[in-house]
Image (tube, grey):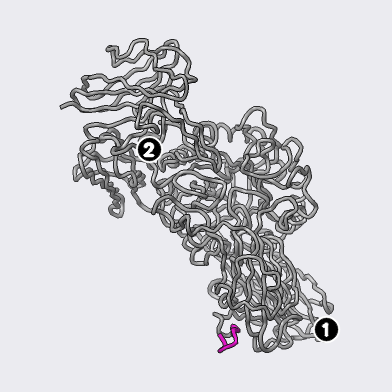
């Protein structure tokens, strides 16, 4: 800071990125922020000393927290979900060499609408919260003394008539943070420069039109802007330089640009024996250098002074998509195994650093992912740069999500269509030189039809609102901008899984590639339905390459199940145990791997992320489908499942580590291992060695735990040595003697003073609950049940004709069966047996006049190895809500 002035001296504001002919200075420190509206704040003399001091990147929003101490630091009292206006002000001194130069203010993003003033002069507005934009600040800049930069941002949730009503996204299952959440810079150039008004792009566009081991051809377009007073005759030199600094190809092209105009020149580079960009195996990058030389009034062809220059990493590769062979990189099949990715994280929101993104990329690469779907909006240059360097293939997307009209309108406003095209233009222009960028996605889940979920506001009736006209406009725009890459979109609802009466538009045909978001076993259907459904889509459109763009399930760090089939997962509420998330991914991956014609699969999601439409699992305002928690550090079991299958580095991982206090004395132990052989030890004794485990999942069934501490060690042996993992579980002595099965549920209820287990050891039957289920953002509604202190356990039950085979030690047992019924229960009887022994004959549980009531029946049984319980329907379905098993001494 300059003493007593409040000015940021640019020479001291941080590292200056100096390129030949231009200077780039970060504007990161010295900002003042006001959390709210301040109508007069654009005035240069406005008093901002009382405003909060912040650095950029910055957001005021903090959204989403867990109801525990794992995976994040946000808490209810630290959350800030306000959406609206915020103001930023910065005092800075002009660069010393500003005279005669052009000055540009560059914003990597501002959410979601930004208005910019410099020294009281209005520079303009940018509508869209995800893309880079620039304003020419030359006329407003003070060459010496104080310059005052003011930015007003507005992330108001769009509503009909609101100031953001025509700015995408209108809706979505993610939170739109506000602020200057990506870097801001001052860029200084000569009057003759490479265009900085190219939709936020670099002003240089390069396309590999052909590439083989022998030769590559690259077409380059350079936009030359002349902001001088006279016409300029200049030279543009384009070159490709390898890692050793050798020039692989170059071209020199004359450029004539009238005063105040921009011209575009074209060059062709031919590279002999190119080193191709080969994905994660060899992500080789050249440097694409562009040098602009010349001066106003210069004679054609004369050698002039360097006026501007840029340099970008550039990978030479070809990409293609085939309905039978999948994705082809440089002509060879290359299976894309990827993840979806949102840019927010605990404690920071969207104001993340490059180091944060580097950590995320390292986490995804360690898991074995080689592709990222950048959802559901344009992500910053950091992730694109890092993807280039890591060899990660990227799906880019604009924020056209679920809805595109507000109120009762049947058609999108012209301003909304224009905004969608503008955001698509910025996406393409800013990212088309990246080797990693493979696909331009024009929409996500705009095919809900009249099944639009209640949590997505607005929109006219789905029978009347047709997305195809807007998608057609975006398809044409994308092809005009970049015909070298395919378009795609992600669909949700073609399966008609929400009901047979749902009218669903077929939107997949609007883009070149198909992408299916499918949550079988979570929101609808069964886990095994995914593969047959994909076969049906392929048969329906055999000429369109198909990918799975989302699949997965919620996974709560503090919730655990003893049997993933014990009851329904609660996709909109609490029951989201970590083990069920793993089950969905295990079953999905088996089906996806069996279909090599899929060009890609992107699981949902790499990390938990913020969304204010959800109250689920053990979190508030968090989508729990991440394989890593909101802190981007705490890894769930499913992450290790993919690492075992996708990363060849030897590893072992014992699952359910966080399920410490065990509910049952007998359990299966599951270990993800890609080692040649894996031994499991319990308190030092081996439980056996396994090898060639399907899907790298080794299971030791029916392991009898010791009372007290159970120290587990999984030891994998491979050619280079051994790898180990450990876990510690506890079996309380009272649980070893007396354990309880909470029937009909995936997630056992809590009980005062004891641990209940989820439904287990059953065969047949269906599950049900007396409670009203949860919905998006709305908790379940419990039913009061008299006659019990375990209301939660008694609310769920198993019904039909079914049996239990419970593994126990030889001996005598007291078995207590609990039943709960409400006033709507059908009158009827059923039988309960234990082998040939009749426990209950033509049993009719009590039916209350109102509400619900519980009752119990107790029996003494002998067991040898297992306890048998058989429930046989009679004039009504058999049922049981809870089973207590106590060993008698």
Q: Main secondary structure of the magenta part?
A: loop
Residue behind mark 2: 561
- The answer to whether mark 1 and mark 2 are in CB contact below 8 A is no
**Callout 2: SS:** loop
**Callout 1: SS:** loop
Examine the structure image and report whether residue 80 is included in the region drawn in magenta.
no
Residue name at image x 67 percent, y 69 percent:
38
The image quadrant where one finds the N terminus is bottom right
- The answer to whether 256 is drawn above or below residue 858 in the figure is below
Residue behind mark 1: 229
Residue 248 in sight here:
no
- The answer to whether 258 is drawn above or below residue 562 in the figure is below
The quarter holding residue 16 reads bottom right
Examine the structure image and report whether residue 6 is included in the region drawn in magenta.
yes
Residue 500 in sight here:
yes
Residue name at image x 63 percent, y 58 percent:
378
* Region rendered in magenta: 1-8
Mark with earlier residue (1, 2) = 1
Residue 162 drawn at (x, y percent): 72, 55
């Amino acid at each position: 800071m300059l003493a007593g002035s409040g000015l940021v001296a640019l020479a001291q504001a941080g590292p200056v990125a100096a390129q030949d002919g231009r200077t780039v200075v970060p504007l990161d420190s010295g900002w003042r922020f006001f959390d709210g509206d301040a109508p007069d704040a654009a005035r240069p003399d406005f008093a901002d000393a009382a405003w909060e001091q912040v650095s950029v990147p910055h957001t005021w929003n903090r959204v989403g927290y867990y109801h525990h101490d794992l995976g994040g630091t946000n808490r209810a009292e630290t959350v800030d979900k306000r959406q609206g206006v915020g103001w930023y002000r910065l005092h800075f001194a002009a660069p010393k060499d500003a005279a005669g130069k052009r000055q540009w203010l560059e914003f990597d993003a501002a959410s979601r609408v930004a208005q910019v003033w410099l020294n009281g002069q209005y520079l303009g507005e940018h509508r869209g919260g995800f893309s880079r934009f620039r304003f020419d600040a030359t006329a407003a800049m003070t060459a010496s003394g104080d310059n005052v930069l003011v930015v007003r941002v507005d992330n108001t949730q769009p509503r009909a008539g609101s100031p953001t009503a025509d700015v995408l996204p209108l809706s979505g299952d993610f939170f739109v943070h506000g602020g200057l959440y990506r870097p801001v810079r001052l860029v200084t150039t000569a009057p003759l420069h490479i265009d900085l008004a190219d939709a936020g792009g670099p002003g240089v566009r390069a396309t590999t039109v052909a590439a083989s081991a022998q030769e590559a051809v690259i077409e380059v377009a350079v936009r030359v802007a002349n902001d001088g007073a006279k016409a300029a005759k200049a030279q543009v030199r384009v070159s490709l330089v390898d890692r050793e600094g050798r020039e692989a190809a170059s071209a020199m092209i004359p450029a004539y640009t009238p005063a105040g105009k921009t011209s575009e020149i074209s060059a062709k580079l031919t590279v002999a024996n190119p080193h191709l960009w080969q994905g994660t195996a060899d992500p080789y990058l050249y440097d694409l250098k562009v040098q602009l030389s010349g001066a106003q009034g210069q004679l054609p062809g004369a050698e002039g002074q360097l006026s501007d220059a840029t340099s970008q990493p550039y990978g030479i590769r070809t990409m293609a998509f085939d309905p039978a062979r999948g994705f082809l990189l440089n002509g060879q099949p290359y299976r894309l195994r990827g993840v979806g990715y949102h840019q927010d994280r605990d404690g920071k929101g969207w104001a993340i650093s490059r180091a944060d993104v580097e950590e995320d990329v390292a986490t995804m690469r360690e898991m074995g992912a080689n592709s990222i779907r950048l959802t559901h909006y344009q992500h910053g240059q950091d992730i694109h740069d890092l993807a280039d360097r890591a060899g990660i293939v990227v799906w880019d997307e604009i924020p056209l999500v679920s809805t595109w009209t507000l109120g009762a309108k049947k058609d999108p406003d012209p301003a909304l269509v224009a905004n969608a095209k503008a955001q698509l233009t910025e996406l393409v222009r800013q990212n088309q030189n990246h080797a990693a960028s493979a696909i331009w996605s024009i929409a996500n889940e705009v095919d809900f039809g009249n099944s639009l979920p209640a949590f997505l506001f607005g929109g006219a009736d789905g029978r009347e609102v047709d997305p195809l006209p807007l998608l057609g406009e975006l398809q044409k725009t994308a092809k005009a901008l970049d015909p070298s890459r395919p378009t795609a979109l992600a669909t949700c609802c073609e399966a008609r899984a929400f009901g047979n009466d749902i009218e669903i538009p077929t939107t997949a045909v609007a883009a070149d590639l198909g992408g299916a978001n499918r949550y079988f076993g979570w929101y609808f259907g069964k886990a095994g339905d995914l593969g047959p459904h994909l076969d049906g889509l392929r048969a329906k459109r055999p000429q369109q390459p198909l990918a799975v763009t989302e699949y997965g399930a919620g996974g709560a760090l503090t919730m655990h199940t003893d049997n993933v089939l014990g009851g329904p997962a609660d996709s909109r509420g609490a029951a989201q145990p970590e083990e069920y998330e793993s089950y969905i991914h295990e079953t999905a991956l088996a089906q996806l791997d069996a279909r090599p014609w899929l060009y890609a699969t992107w699981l949902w999601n790499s990390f938990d992320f913020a969304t204010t439409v959800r109250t689920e699992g053990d979190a508030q305002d968090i989508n729990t489908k991440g394989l890593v928690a909101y802190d981007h550090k705490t890894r769930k079991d499913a992450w290790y499942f993919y690492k075992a299958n996708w990363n060849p580095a030897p590893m072992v991982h014992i699952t359910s580590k966080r399920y410490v206090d065990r509910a049952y004395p007998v359990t299966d132990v599951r270990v993800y291992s890609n080692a040649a052989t894996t031994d499991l030890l319990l308190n030092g004794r081996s439980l056996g060695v396994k090898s060639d485990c399907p899907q790298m999942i080794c299971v030791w069934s029916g392991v009898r735990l010791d009372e007290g501490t159970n120290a587990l060690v999984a030891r994998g042996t491979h050619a280079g040595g051994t790898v180990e993992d450990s876990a510690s579980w506890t079996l309380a002595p009272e649980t070893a003697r007396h354990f309880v099965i909470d029937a009909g549920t995936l997630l056992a209820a809590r009980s005062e003073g004891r641990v209940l287990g989820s439904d287990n050891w059953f065969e047949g039957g269906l599950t049900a609950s007396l409670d009203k289920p949860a919905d998006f953002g709305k908790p379940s509604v419990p039913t009061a049940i008299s006659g019990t202190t375990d209301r939660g356990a008694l609310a769920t039950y198993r019904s039909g004709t079914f049996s239990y085979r419970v593994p126990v030690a030889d001996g005598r047992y007291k078995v207590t069966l609990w039943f709960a019924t409400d006033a709507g229960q059908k009158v009827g009887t059923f039988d309960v047996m234990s082998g040939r022994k009749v426990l209950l004959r033509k049993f009719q549980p009590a039916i209350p006049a109102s509400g619900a009531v519980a009752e119990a029946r107790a029996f003494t049984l002998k067991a040898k190895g297992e306890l048998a319980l058989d429930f046989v329907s009679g004039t009504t379905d058999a049922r049981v809500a809870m089973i207590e098993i106590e060993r008698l001494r």
